Image: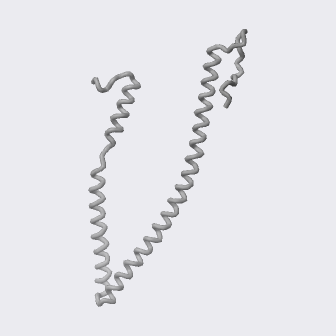
Amino acid sequence: MDLNKSTGTGTTDGGERTIGQLVADISNQMSGLVKAEIELAKAEVKADVTKGGIGAGLLAGAAFFALIAFILLCFALAYGLVAAGLAQWAAFLVVTGVLLVLAAVLALVGRGRLQQVSAPKRTIDTAKDSVEAIKGHDRTRA
């Protein structure tokens, strides 16, 4: 982008451009710069999102196969208990009970961790300070 390029608004009699023309040039150049930066950001984000989407798809595939393997492992465990002499219904009941206990423990631990999450106090305070500064007030004097 040529910073010395005129907007085509003409010049004064002495060949110099007016302040209005210079301000218009600056405005046009800033607008062009912002548009170029936005286009660059879009291109970078598009490439990253594509890579992220492929990665997420691969992780979803891996999770699917891991789930199938876990289900088969549970069946193998139940049939192992049957081979050890436990009745089939009892073996599957034991495996189901173990899974339910595991699910309950994970749910309780997860709930406890979620209750520890709080609002981002510093970010909220900084945002409030910024709004007050833009309005021309000093929040710390209040």
**Residue drawn at (27%, 51%), measured in percent from left and top?**
116
- 95, above or below 86, in the image: above
87 left or right, relative to 20: left
Above or below — where is 119 with respect to 106?
above
x%, y% of residue 133?
38, 25
On the rendered image, what quadrant is the N terminus found in?
top right
Residue 111 horizontal/vertical position (percent): 28, 57
Residue at the image point whose x is 70% and y is 11% from the top: 12
> Would you place residue 52 above or below residue 13 in this image?
below
Q: Is residue 56 left or right of residue 102?
A: right
Left or right of 45 on screen, residue 99: left
Q: Is residue 7 above or below residue 13?
A: below
In this picture the colour scheme is: one colour
Instruction: Give the quadrant of residue 93.
Output: bottom left
Residue sitting at 27 percent across and 52 percent down? 115
> How many numbered tags mark residues here?
0
Residue at the extreme top: 13
Say which of 4 and 106 sits in front.
Answer: 4
The residue located at (59%, 41%) in the rendering is: 40
x, y (%) of residue 89? 31, 84
Q: Could you say where residue 61 lies in the image, as x and y percent from the top left?
A: 50, 66
Instruction: Give 79 or 51, whichever is nearer the viewer.
Output: 51
Q: Quadrant of the C terminus?
A: top left
Q: Answer with left or right where residue 60 lies relative to residue 132.
A: right
Snapshot quadrant of residue 16: top right
